[in-house]
Image (cartoon, grey):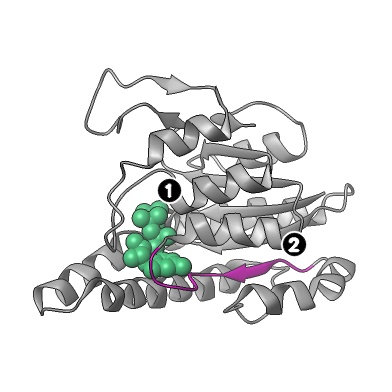
Amino acid sequence: MRVVISIGGAYFADAVRIKNMAAALDELVEHPSGCGLYAVTGGGAVARHYIAIARELGANEAICDYIGIALTRVNARLLISALRNAYPEPFYDYTSVRAKLPELESCGKIAVMGGVTPGYTTDAVSAILAEYINADLLLNVTTVDGVYDVDPRKHPNAKRYSRLTAKELVRLTTECDLRAGSRIVIDPVAAKIIERSGIRTVVLDGSNPRNIIDVIINGRQHGTEIT
Ligand code: UTP
């Protein structure tokens, strides 16, 4: 099974969280089922902090996006530092990952990459990568336990979906703010890619990284499944 995991920036805030996430990814890639793993790292609060400074200095949104991308790549390096089975350098584009597929999978190495291009977030990077390498599953690991009708951090009565069609996901995300550093569960570009590629996608809370193993190895349901 080939899996792309998009890991929200919150999981790179300290060494303990990075170690816990890395341990789960190492366990997955070492599992006898022989899973091929591709991790995409988010930028988190540090990215938002630098984006806010750049904006205050008058930088335009594309420049702010490039600052966000730089921070996602720092987090890729942090994750690689914590993994036993990582390919030693982060990837900067999709084609380099695809070119290395046979080597990565025959050696059981995890490919790690951050952002790529202004105008979207690492949600879209992971969806494009999943489509490009024909992944079987896309996991979006965030700090909320799935997709809600409205932001549950702001609305206590928000309704969580356990299942959602890709079309419904596109509808829910089109109204989103796409400025650099926006906090959205899935960005609209990612939703459109998920819709066109038909890739099975799960959005879940990664606070307990065992949930990731549970979804991939045990086929259990956590968070929201997009079909
Ligand atoms: P994230 O992927 O971390 O944004 O990229 P996010 O999903 O809003 O945040 P978290 O990490 O899940 O909390 C951080 C910022 O970097 C820029 C965008 O400005 C994004 O908001 N970025 C990232 C790009 O412009 N292109 C990319 O390919 C990736």
Of labels 1 and 2, the one closer to you? 1
Task: Find numbered disc 1 in the image and state the secondary structure of the residue it sits on.
Answer: helix
Circle 2 SS class: loop
Q: Where residue 12 sits: x, y (%)?
A: 43, 61
The question of residue 34 being in magenta is answered with: no
Can residue 63 be seen by looking at this rendering? yes
Mark 1 vs mark 2: which is more N-terminal? 2
- 208 on left or right of 30: left
Disc 1 residue type (three-letter): Pro
Task: Residue at 48%, 70% (x, y): give it.
Answer: 115
Numbered mark located on residue 133 in the image: 2
In screen coordinates, is 134 left or right of 25?
right
| Quarter-of-image position of residue 100 | bottom right
* Residue 34 as seen in the image, left or right of residue 137: right
If the image is split into quadrants, where does the C terminus sit?
Answer: top right
| Residue to which mark 1 is pinned | 188
Q: Residues within 10 Å of mark 1 (few under 14, many from 20)?
A: many
Q: Which residues are magenta?
A: 109-119
Residue 110, magenta (yes or no): yes
- Of the residues shown, which amino acid type is indicated by label 2? Ile
Q: Dot 2 surroundings within 10 Å: few (below 14), some, or many (20 or more)?
A: some
Q: What is the quadrant of residue 44 in the picture?
A: bottom left
